[in-house]
Amino acid sequence: MPDTNDSKSAPVDAMVMPFVPYYTDERCTIYNDDCLRVLPWIDAGSIVTDPPYGIDWRPRVNHTGDDHIWHDDKPFHPSVFLAFGQYHLFWGAQYFADKLPVRESWLCWVKRPIVQDFSRDPRTYATIELAWTDFAKKPAFKSIAWDGGKRQGAAENRTFSHPSQKPLELMRWCVGMLPDDHGIVVDPFMGSGTTLAACKMEGLTAIGIEVEERYCELAADRLRQGVLF
Ligand SMILES: C[S@@+](CC[C@H](N)C(=O)[O-])C[C@H]1O[C@@H](n2cnc3c(N)ncnc32)[C@H](O)[C@@H]1O
């Protein structure tokens, strides 16, 4: 008869991560699922992400039309994600600043136009983006060329791969500010994998979670081919 008082007799399998990676390499792992299901199973050190802002944004130019962002029509609640990891960064935080602790260490991306002067049409695009962090030492901005929907350096007529893909240079700047004890960097709203590509280039270990398989495939392609754009 088993000794029911022996807690060590609990099945080991009960603690095994139940999600199979969509992609994995020496630095990066991707899960294709809802982040709220996967996150509790991950030993996250830092959350660096660009979530759905809750603004129901629909891109107007240079896109395929089938690129509405999952969950962007619902309010975003950052407090859920503050419970994971020690350090946090959220792009788009101006849309949910009232739900975040007061900090002065905001980051700003100034979108320097390279093709069209979209800054003259604020109805179409924000000309800056803001990120809230609890680890940057002081407020800072970075000016990075952007042309209103196409990646810098991409062919003129190419449709954009992800409707809100961030510049790799921007995400390298962000992860480069993480303190030394950053642990595993997790992007629960991975999109096309820019955070993971940036971590890979900076020599950090990263996990991305993305609910849409087409974006997991895109991110895996970027990481697999070493095409870090
Ligand atoms: C703003 S985009 C991130 C774009 C990314 N920064 C990039 O450079 O490609 C947010 C992503 O979160 C994904 N998403 C939304 N809700 C999610 C959820 N509950 N779990 C995982 N991914 C989710 C969307 O499909 C979308 O690709």
Image (cartoon, helix red, strand yellow):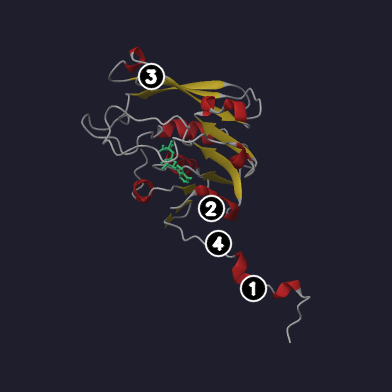
Q: Are marks 1 and 4 in contact (CB under 8 Å)?
A: no
Tell me how far mark 4 sits from mark 2, CA to CA: 11 Å
**Can you tell which of label 2 and label 1 is closer to the viewer?**
2
- Mark 3 lies on residue: 112
Tag 2 or tag 4, which sits nearer the N-term? 4
Tag 3 or tag 1, which sits nearer the N-term? 1
Residue at point 31%, 15% (across, down): 117
Q: Nearer the viewer, residue 203 or 190?
A: 190
Q: Nearer the viewer, residue 109 or 57?
A: 57
Q: Is the shortest distance between ligand 1 and the CB of mark 3 under 8 Å?
A: no
User: Can residue 108 be seen in the rendering of this structure?
Assistant: yes
Task: Give residue 87's position: percent from left, percent from top.
Answer: 62, 38
- Count of all numbered marks drawn on residues in the image: 4
- Mark 1 lies on residue: 11
Residue at point 48%, 50% (across, down): 34
Rendered-image quadrant of the C terminus: top left
User: Residue lying furthest bottom in this view?
Assistant: 1
Residue at point 33%, 38% (across, down): 67
Tag 2 or tag 3, which sits nearer the N-term? 2
Task: Give residue 115's position: percent from left, percent from top.
Answer: 28, 20
Residue 35 as seen in the image, left or right of residue 126: right
Residue 155 as seen in the image, left or right of residue 93: left
Secondary structure of the residue carrying numbered label 3: strand
Tell me how far mark 4 sits from mark 3, CA to CA: 43 Å
Residue at point 51%, 34% (across, down): 75
The three-letter code of the residue at mark 3 reads Arg
- Mark 4 lies on residue: 17
Residue 6 as seen in the image, left or right of residue 137: right
